[in-house]
Amino acid sequence: MLAALLAVSFYADVLPILERRCLGCHQVGEAAPMALGSFSEARPFAKAMRDAVVSESMPPGGGMPAAEVAILRQWSARPVAGSPVRVAVLPVRPVLRGDLTLRMAEPFRVPAEATVAYQHFVLPTGQEQGRWIQAIEIRPGNRRVVHHAVAFVRTARSEFLRGGKLSVEDEVLGTYLPGEGVVRLPEGLAKWLPAGAEIVLQMHYTSTGQAESDQTEIRLEYGVRPRERVYTMSVAQWDFAIPPFAKAYPVEAEFTVRTGVRVLAVTPHLHLRGRSMRVTAGEQVVLDVPRYRFDWQLRRVLTKPVTLASGETIRVEATFDNSRNNPRNPDPSATVRWGEQSGQEMMVAFVDVAIPAGWPPTEIYRPKRF
C-alpha cells in the first residue's frame, strides 16, 4: 500500500488530470476561488479535491473516470510533489476578433453581504446596419461576483424593460457561465444582430463577504451571411409551486415547433433546489442531467444536431429537492415558486436551433397558413 502511495506524485500524475479537467476555472483570474496549477497551490486543497471528485460535485457535470479519481484519492493520502517540476499547461482559450466591444458604462458595486436583485444594463450598439455574429464573449470584470450573465437583443419596437415583457424578438445573443468563454458558431451558422438594436445585459451577482465591483463587457465578431440562422429559444414553466419538504417534485414544460428546425445545443437553468433535468427533442434525448448542481449551468453542444419537423415537440422534465436532505436548500419549509433569486426557482432550458438565414424566428412559433 505504501509503495502505491509513494508512486503517485503531483507533477507526474495529478497535474495532467487538473490540466484536462480543472484548470479552465482553477487559475488566477478565473471563476474558481483557488488556483491549482502548482504543487504549492494545490497541496492545501488535497483532501477537498478528493472529496469533490468522489462526491461528483466537481468537475462540472461530474463523472470523472474512476482511474483519475483513484489517483487523486491516493495523492490526497500522501501529497508529494515529485519531479520534474514544471509549469502547468493552461487550456487554450478560443479568441475572437473584437469587431464590436460594448462595456457597462460604470462599475456596479456589489455589497459584502446582500441578496442582489438581477441587474439590467442597456448597451447601445450604434450599428446602422444589421450584422451576422459569428462569435461572442461576455467577459466579466470580476468573476468572483458574477454567477452568470445573459445578453439579450432588444429592438426598437421591443417592450422589454419599457413596461413590457420579453418577446420572441428579444433573443438571447449569448451567455456567460463559470468555465465558459468564447462561443464560436461553426461555419455556415451565425446569429443576427438587427440594425439599431441594443444589448440588454442581465447580470446575476453574488456577494463574497467583502465589498467588490464589476464592469462586464461583451465582445462580438462579425461573420458573413450564413446558410442558417441560430436562434436561442426558451422552453420554460413559470406556473409551479414546489411544496415544503418535497424530495423530488416534478415540473414539466414543452414547446411544439411550427416549422422545421435543427436542435444544436441546450443550456439547463435551475436554482438551488434543482435536482435533475432531462430534455427531449422529438424522440431523442438531447440533455440528461440526473444530478443537477447550481454551478453546472454549462451549454451542451450536441455532437450530432437533431432535426425536428413542424409539429414535433421539445419537452423539458425537471425535479426539485425541497427537502432537508438538500444541503443547499435555504428553507425546506417554504413553498417555492418562480423567481429570479437563488432562493426562488426557475425551470428553463435555453435551446439553440438553426433555421434558414432568411426566416424570422416568429416562424418557429406561428402556425402555418395554407
Image (cartoon, rainbow, N blue to C red):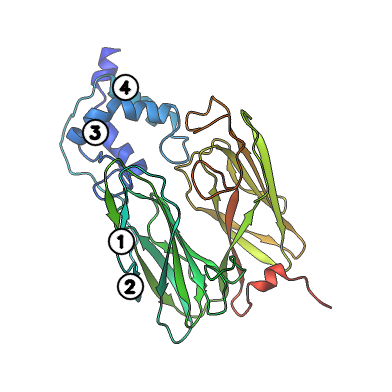
Where residue 244 appears, x then y in whole percent? 62, 31
Type of the residue with mark 3? Ala
Q: Earlier in the sequence, mark 3 or mark 4?
A: 3
Q: CA distance from mark 3 to mark 4?
A: 14 Å
The local secondary structure at tag 2 comes to loop
Q: Which residue is mark 4?
A: 74
Position of residue 230 relative to residue 255, above or below, is below
Q: Which residue is mark 1?
A: 215
Q: Earlier in the sequence, mark 4 or mark 2?
A: 4
Q: Which mark is residue 42?
A: 3
Circles 3 and 4: CB atoms closer than 8 Å: no
Q: Earlier in the sequence, mark 1 or mark 3?
A: 3
Position of residue 190 relative to residue 3, above or below, is below
Circles 1 and 2: CB atoms closer than 8 Å: no
The local secondary structure at tag 1 comes to loop
Q: Earlier in the sequence, mark 1 or mark 2?
A: 2
The answer to whether 131 appears left or right of 42 in the picture is right
Q: Which residue is mark 2?
A: 98
- Name the quadrant containing residue 203: bottom left
